[in-house]
């Protein structure tokens, strides 16, 4: 990270292995569907982390969560979602807790069998809450998005990000209003740490 001045923040320079790409415009270029979830536009040469920090200071700070949901590689992305939900255990339903266990199993051992367990759990969830969205994110991490036994349907690259974004924002919406901004910053901070250490 290069030092900033009194008027400019430091910029990110070191590569983060947990990101799909390092530059935000490149991310938007590979997944143009991101523009449906993030209205702000990245700057030329702007690192994902720098764009995320700018989003957090903007009119819609939740877009920083959206950015990280699309930017992270699948395995750290699902683990990030897992940790975001676990940050407020008192707000989780029994179904959310079950889904977290399924997702943790896929992160620990990302086999096709575990992926299908997550996919089927998300597809057949009684309620499409944060845990169900996280299970779908794990299920859409690779391979086919069709249920097991049906003809394969290639998962679009953006699908995991969209599911993860829905799950984390749904979880954030459960947080009391006076604590929501602090929790949002915590979520995005965790995403950066995972991206750097993955």
Image (tube, grey):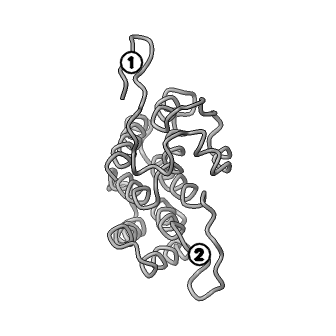
Q: Distance between the Cα atoms at labels 1 and 2?
A: 45 Å
Side of 76 where 64 appears, left or right? right
Query: For residue 9, what is the image quadrant?
Result: top left
Which quadrant is home to the N terminus?
top left
Q: Where's residue 178, x and y in %?
A: 41, 34
Q: Which mark is residue 64?
A: none
| Depicted 46 relative to depicted 107: above or below | above
The one nearer the camera, 158 or 43, is: 43
Query: For residue 8, what is the image quadrant?
Result: top left
Side of 53 where 123 appears, left or right? right
Q: Where's residue 196, x and y in %?
A: 35, 45
Counting labels gives 2
Point 43% across, 27% down: residue? 11
Secondary structure category for the residue under label 1: loop
The reply to whether dot 1 and dot 2 touch (C-beta < 8 Å) is no
Point 41% across, 32% down: residue? 12
Local crowd at mark 2 within 10 Å, few (<14), some, or many (≥20)? many
Point 37% across, 24% down: residue? 2
Query: For residue 6, what is the image quadrant?
Result: top left
Secondary structure category for the residue under label 2: loop
**Which mark sits nearer the N-terminus, 1 or 2?**
1
The one nearer the camera, 190 or 153, is: 153
Kindly identify which residue carries mark 2.
Answer: 144
| Depicted 175 relative to depicted 92: above or below | above
| Depicted 1 relative to depicted 20: above or below | above
Kindly identify which residue carries mark 1.
Answer: 4
Q: Where's residue 43, x and y in %?
A: 59, 29
Looking at the image, the residue that sits furthest to the top is 6
| Depicted 123 relative to depicted 63: above or below | below
Q: Where's residue 17, x and y in %?
A: 39, 50
């Amino acid at each position: 990270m290069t030092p900033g001045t009194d008027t400019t923040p430091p910029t990110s320079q070191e590569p983060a292995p947990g990101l799909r790409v390092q530059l935000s415009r490149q991310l938007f270029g590979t997944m143009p569907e991101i523009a449906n979830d993030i209205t702000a536009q990245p700057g030329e040469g702007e690192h994902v982390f720098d764009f995320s920090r700018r989003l957090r200071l903007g009119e819609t700070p939740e877009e920083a969560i959206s950015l990280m949901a699309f930017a992270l590689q699948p395995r750290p992305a699902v683990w990030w979602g897992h940790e975001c939900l676990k940050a407020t255990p008192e707000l989780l339903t029994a179904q959310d807790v079950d889904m977290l266990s399924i997702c943790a199993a896929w992160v620990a051992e990302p086999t096709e069998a575990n992926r299908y367990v997550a996919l089927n759990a998300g597809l057949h969830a009684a309620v499409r809450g944060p845990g169900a969205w996280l299970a779908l994110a794990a299920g859409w991490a690779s391979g086919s998005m069709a249920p097991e036994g049906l003809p394969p349907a290639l998962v679009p690259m953006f699908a995991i990000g969209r599911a993860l974004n829905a799950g984390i924002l749904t979880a954030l919406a459960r947080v009391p209003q006076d604590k929501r901004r602090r929790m949002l910053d915590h979520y995005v901070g965790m995403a950066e740490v995972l991206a750097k250490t993955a």
